[in-house]
Image (tube, grey):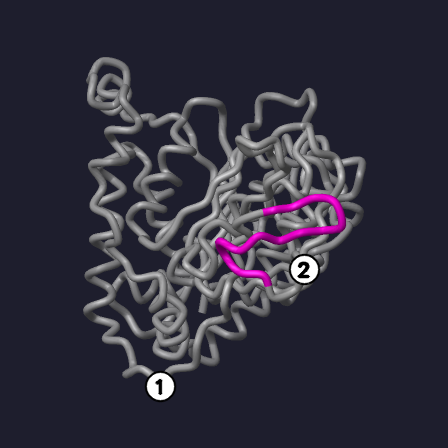
Amino acid sequence: MLHRRPRIRAGSRIGQDTCSDDLCFDDIGYVNSPSASASPAPPDLDAWRERALGFEREIARAVVGQSAALRLLTIAVFARGHVLLEGDVGVGKTTLLQAAARAIGGDYGRIEGTIDLMPADLIYHTSLDEHGRPRVEPGPVLRHGERLSVFFFNEINRARPQVHSLLLRLMAERSLSAFNREYAFPYLQVFADRNQVEREETFELPAAARDRFFMEIAIATPADPDVRRALIFDPRYHDVAALVDAVAPAVLDPAQLDAVARAIQQHVRASDRLQHYVEALWTAVRDPARTGIRIDDVDIERLIAGGASPRGMAYLVRAARVRAWLEGRDMLVPEDLRAVFFETVAHRIFLAPVYEARRATIVPALCRAVFETVPVP
């Protein structure tokens, strides 16, 4: 095994030998920055809404009984936000993300979280060629260059914090530094999942890491008896690869999604009354005692260590606007906010340590109480 980091000569290209003093490396894939082009015409939002709904329908061919999660995932795609899926083992998290990646289009990268995974493993691999010489090849992030549209991190809580740090930069800036240069990923969206069952040899994501995810979406076992029977007895649902292959590829165009997302945010308006309502929701989350919220067996004065940030509330409005657009409206209504509130805000509410062990019950109760207490405009 090669333990030393390679020293890469600036200006090297694909297919060109790249040598240090005593080691030689081939085929380092460097990424060119996107070239400048003329401003495209504004996107047709009506046509794109039909494509978005078609995107949902395609994924539903592979994943059944998850209509709410599919809508939330579609909202995240058109809000250009990163997504963390949570749920038990075997409920379809990976299948959902693989189907979404296929329908989004563009190039797809994936890595499995393991306790021995290192940050460099995302960037490059080292091996010996047939002549016994060390060889460096691009890792799952660099392999596709700027064409990378979806990067899937499976079992993210199995990876060490050092790996999380590299992923955070990739998520925040859509770029990273390697081999003495900068690599850009202009169309990138990160999907990750973690299971809530296993705790051994796992590293829980810190608050800063969770805040980088636009949404946290829970995937539960379907409650519909017909769906449950189909998942158990219908052989079609036993072959995950065939299910994903049945999804139409490239329903969307990753290169256009940023422009569509900007157009949606400009298209959907928020009235003054709705804006005041959002501010009242924010106050209720940050200081529930002042809003008059009560939760059984909770000292509401001591509950909150840190409420949702301005970024969290901006993400709430961003998601709500996409939902309104998918519903065919150009104006926000309170139901748009309620439909995405938990997924965009709940993981940004930080409880006092004495209540953190009860987070799974207290935070949902707090979110329900917020909407029951704050007057609807």
**Which disc, if any, is residue 38?**
1
> Seen in the image, is 141 located left or right of residue 205?
left
Whole-number angstrom distance, CA of label 1 to CA of label 2: 34 Å
Residue 266: x percent and y percent?
39, 79
Residue 359 in which image quadrant:
top right
Residue 259 in which image quadrant:
bottom left
Check if residue 306 falls in the magenta segment.
no
Instruction: Using the image, determine if residue 235 lies above or below residue 164.
Output: above
Residue kind at label 2, given as amino acid type? Arg
Q: Which residues are magenta?
A: 12-25
Lower position in the chain sequence, tag 1 or tag 2: 2
Residue kind at label 1, given as amino acid type? Ala
Location of the C terminus by quadrant is bottom left
Instruction: Using the image, determine if residue 98 lies above or below residue 14.
Output: above
**Would residue 246 be visible to someone looking at this image?**
yes
**Residue 23 or 339: which is nearer the viewer?**
23
Main SS of the magenta part reads: loop
> Seen in the image, is 96 located left or right of residue 146?
left
Residue 41: x percent and y percent?
28, 83
Q: Which residue is mark 2?
A: 9
Residue 246: x percent and y percent?
20, 36
Q: Secondary structure at mark 1?
A: loop
Contact between labelled residues 2 and 1, with CB atoms less than 8 Å apart: no
- The residue depicted at 39 percent of the width and 78 percent of the height is 269
**Residue 331 or 37: which is nearer the viewer?**
37
**Residue 342 or 216: which is nearer the viewer?**
216
**Residue 204 or 101: which is nearer the viewer?**
101
- The residue depicted at 36 percent of the width and 33 percent of the height is 95
